[in-house]
C-alpha cells in the first residue's frame, strides 16, 4: 500500500464506527455559538442536541476558515514521519479552506522537498465530503498511489450528490444564501426549498415545494428514482440531519423500501455546516448519477 496519510476536516460527516478504525485523520474546525468559540474536533463526541437546541432558542452562530498555520501544524507532523498526505477539503465554493491548505502545502514542500502533499477540493460538504474521503481510503487500499488517487478523486468528485431541505429559511438568509424576500415569503407560505451542491461546489436552490412532507419525498426520490444510483462499489447513502432523527428514520425507511441493498447511515450534521442550515435540516447524500 502506498505510504501516505488521508486527511480531511471536521466539516465532513463520517460515521463514528468508520472513523474509529483510525485510517483517516481529521483537522479540527472552529465555530462560534452565541459568541462562545468552540472547536469541533471529534465528530463522535459532540452534543448535537445541545447545539441544535440552542439554535432553536434563537442562538447565533458563525464559522471561519482554517488558517494556513493550522494546516502547517497538522501537515508537518505527518511529513516528519516520512509520509506523504492526501488532504480532502470542504468545498472551495463554500469556504476558502482549500486555498489555505494549498498555501501551507506549497510552503511545506519547499521545506521538505522529498515529501508530497496533495490538496483536493471535494466540491462537497457534510456527508458528501465524508463519502469522498471514505472512497479515497478504499482507493488507497486497492493500491492507488497518491497521484492516482488524487486524479481519481478530481475526476469523480462530481458524482457525489447532495440533496437537502431546511426547516428555517432564516439560517440560509443570514449566510447570504437566499434573499430576505425569499426567506420571508417562504416562511409565510410554508414553502420549503430543495437545495443541492452544484458542480462548482457552490450552493444552489433547485426547487421550491410546499410543506415538509413534499420536500422530504423530493430529496429521497432523487436517489430512489434512478436505479443506477446504487453502486455496490459505493453503496453508502448518508442521511445527515439537524436534530431531526424521526424525519431521518422516515427517509431511511422510504429509501430502503425502494432500494433495500443500499447502506443507509443516519448521523447528525456537523456544527460547521449546521450553523448555516439550522435545526431540522435533512440531507440525502450518495455517490450517484444525478448531482443536478
Image (cartoon, grey):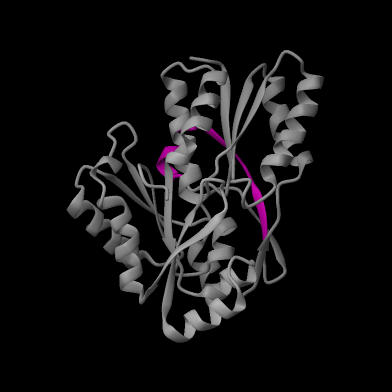
Q: Please identify the quarter of the rendering in which residue 284 is found.
A: bottom left
Q: Residue furthest bottom?
A: 188
Any part of residue 1 in sight: yes
| Residue at the (48%, 48%) spot, across then down | 13
Above or below: residue 103 compared with residue 139: below
| Residue at the (27%, 33%) spot, across then down | 232
Residue 28 within the segment the image draws in magenta: yes
> What x and y, as percent, mark residue 85?
62, 25
193 on left or right of 179: left
| Residue at the (70%, 17%) spot, across then down | 115
> What x and y, as percent, mark residue 270?
53, 55
Q: Which of these two is toward me, 254 or 141?
A: 254
> What x and y, as percent, mark residue 283?
41, 58
Which span of residues is magenta-colored?
14-31
Above or below: residue 2 compared with residue 238: above
Q: Please identify the quarter of the rendering in which residue 287 is found.
A: top left
Any part of residue 44 in sight: no
Above or below: residue 73 compared with residue 84: below
> What x and y, as percent, mark residue 54?
56, 73
| Residue at the (42%, 38%) spot, across then down | 18
264 on left or right of 68: left
Above or below: residue 183 compared with residue 286: below
Amino acid at each position: 500500500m502506498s505510504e501516505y496519510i488521508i486527511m480531511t476536516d471536521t466539516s465532513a460527516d463520517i460515521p463514528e464506527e468508520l472513523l474509529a478504525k483510525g485510517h483517516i485523520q481529521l483537522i479540527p474546525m472552529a465555530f462560534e455559538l452565541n459568541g462562545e468559540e468552540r472547536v469541533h474536533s471529534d465528530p463522535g463526541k459532540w452534543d448535537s442536541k445541545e447545539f441544535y437546541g440552542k439554535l432553536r432558542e434563537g442562538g447565533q452562530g458563525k464559522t471561519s476558515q482554517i488558517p494556513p498555520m493550522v494546516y502547517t501544524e497538522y501537515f508537518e507532523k505527518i511529513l516528519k514521519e516520512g509520509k506523504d498526505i492526501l488532504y480532502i477539503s470542504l468545498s472551495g465554493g463554500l469556504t476558502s479552506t482549500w486555498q489555505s491548505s494549498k498555501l501551507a502545502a506549497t510552503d511545506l514542500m519547499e521545506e521538505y522537498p522529498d515529501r508530497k502533499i496533495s490538496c483536493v477540493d471535494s466540491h462537497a460538504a457534510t456527508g458528501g465530503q465524508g463519502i469522498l474521503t471514505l472512497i479515497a481510503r478504499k482507493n488507497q487500499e486497492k493500491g492507488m498511489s497518491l497521484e492516482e488517487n488524487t486524479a481519481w478523486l478530481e475526476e469523480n468528485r462530481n458524482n457525489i450528490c447532495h440533496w437537502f431541505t431546511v426547516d428555517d429559511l432564516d439560517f440560509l438568509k443570514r449566510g447570504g444564501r437566499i434573499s430576505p424576500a425569499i426567506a420571508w415569503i417562504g416562511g409565510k407560505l410554508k414553502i420549503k426549498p430543495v437545495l443541492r451542491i452544484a458542480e462548482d461546489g457552490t450552493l444552489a436552490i433547485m426547487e421550491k415545494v410546499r410543506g415538509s412532507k413534499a420536500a422530504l419525498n423530493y430529496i429521497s426520490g432523487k436517489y430512489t428514482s434512478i436505479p443506477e444510483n446504487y453502486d455496490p462499489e459505493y453503496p453508502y447513502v448518508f442521511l445527515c440531519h439537524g436534530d431531526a432523527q424521526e424525519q431521518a428514520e422516515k427517509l431511511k425507511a422510504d429509501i430502503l423500501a425502494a432500494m433495500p441493498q443500499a447502506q443507509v447511515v443516519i448521523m447528525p450534521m456537523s456544527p460547521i455546516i449546521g450553523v448555516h442550515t439550522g435545526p431540522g435540516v435533512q440531507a440525502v447524500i450518495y455517490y450517484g448519477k444525478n448531482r443536478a
